[in-house]
Amino acid sequence: MNEPELAAFLRSRRDRIRPSEVGLPTGPRRRVPGLRREEVAQLAGLSADYYTELERGRSAQPSAQVLASLARALRLNGDERDHLFHLANRPNPPAARGPAAHVQPAMLSLLDRLTTTPAQVITDLHEVLVQNPSAVALLGRQPVARGPATSFVYRWFTDPDIRALHPPEDHDHHSRVFVADLRAVVARQARDTEANRMVAALRRRSQEFATLWETRDVALRRADHKRIVHPALGVIEVDCHSLFSEDGHQRLLWFTAPPGTEGAAQLELLSVIGTQDMTVEEAAEARHGR
């Protein structure tokens, strides 16, 4: 690993980003025009000490997932991302999927602007790549997983606990939509071994999935009306919208509710309480301004 060049490259990329470009406040006491080290660490989900050691050229070789997080935090384009991996002695940058996938800068730029709207970027296999704070407050932080379990669709059919996110009476609808969406992805990427492996695994592990797969329904999930069960606010009705990347491998999802509806009021409250723990009673009092 070329520690000095890696450190210099990280500093150069940090210096060029203005805080406002990544949703951070611009205070009067800034001594540098770019981001501070602790801000990059925060955006990448790393400790400030660890990132500081990277910039000093003293850290152990970072993992592919750490490098991917830094590429997102520093808004690197594809060539810059590949260069970062090369400097860290990881010559094979991650593919378009998995937790280490490179999120397209245009997607991140849009995500940064959705400051009060729950939004996240996922792959076409429904692997969450990055969430804004509002999405974490609404949906919860996605668990760290490996292999097929990084996909929400895979967990939907193999982990009963994941279905608690939606009311039981909605489960059949989501199962049908997930399978139709996955069939559309497989059809568009006929030689995609990863997608085909996931389908094969689901057909073995889930009779429900296997039965739905045989219906041969096909439809990309471009928009949907959802009911989400929140631990403090109860059931929140939202509209989910999707923006697809040019190659179709990634999607920006955002969640809204029509003005004046109960869902809109709940989302507004959620933007205030964030991820803090609240009882149902406390949430009700907050909603009524008590």
Image (tube, rainbow, N blue to C red):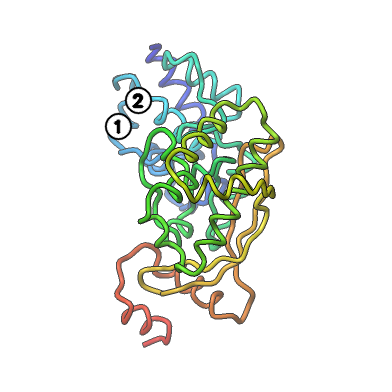
Give percent across and percent down for residue 273: 39, 69
**Mark drawn on residue 177:** none
User: Residue 168: which quarter of the image?
Assistant: bottom left
For this rendering, which residue is in front, 195 or 103? 195
Label 2 sits on a secondary structure element that is helix
Q: Is residue 260 placed above or below 143 in the rendered structure? A: below
Count of residue discs = 2
**Left or right: where 24 falls relative to 282:** right
Residue 135: give x, y in percent of width and height.
48, 57
- Write down the residue under mark 2: 54
The residue tagged 1 is: 50
Q: Amino acid at mark 2?
A: Leu
Quarter the N terminus occupies = top left
In this rendering, is residue 227 above or below 123?
below
Circles 1, 2 touching at the beta carbon (< 8 Å): yes
Query: Which residue is depicted at the point 46% across and 40% down?
Result: 35
Q: Quadrant of the C terminus?
A: bottom left
Question: Alpha-carbon distance for marks 1 and 2?
Answer: 6 Å
**Disc 2: CA contacts within 10 A as few (<14), some (14-19) or many (>=20):** many
Label 1, residues with CA under 10 Å away: few <14, some 14-19, many ≥20: some
What is the three-letter code of the residue carrying label 1?
A: Tyr
Which residue is located at x 45 percent, y 45 percent? 206
Residue 174 is situated, as x and y percent measured from the top left of the image, at: 55, 58
In the rendered view, would you say 266 is above or below 137? below
Residue at screen point 44% across, 16% down: 90
- Residue 275 pos. (x, y %): 36, 62
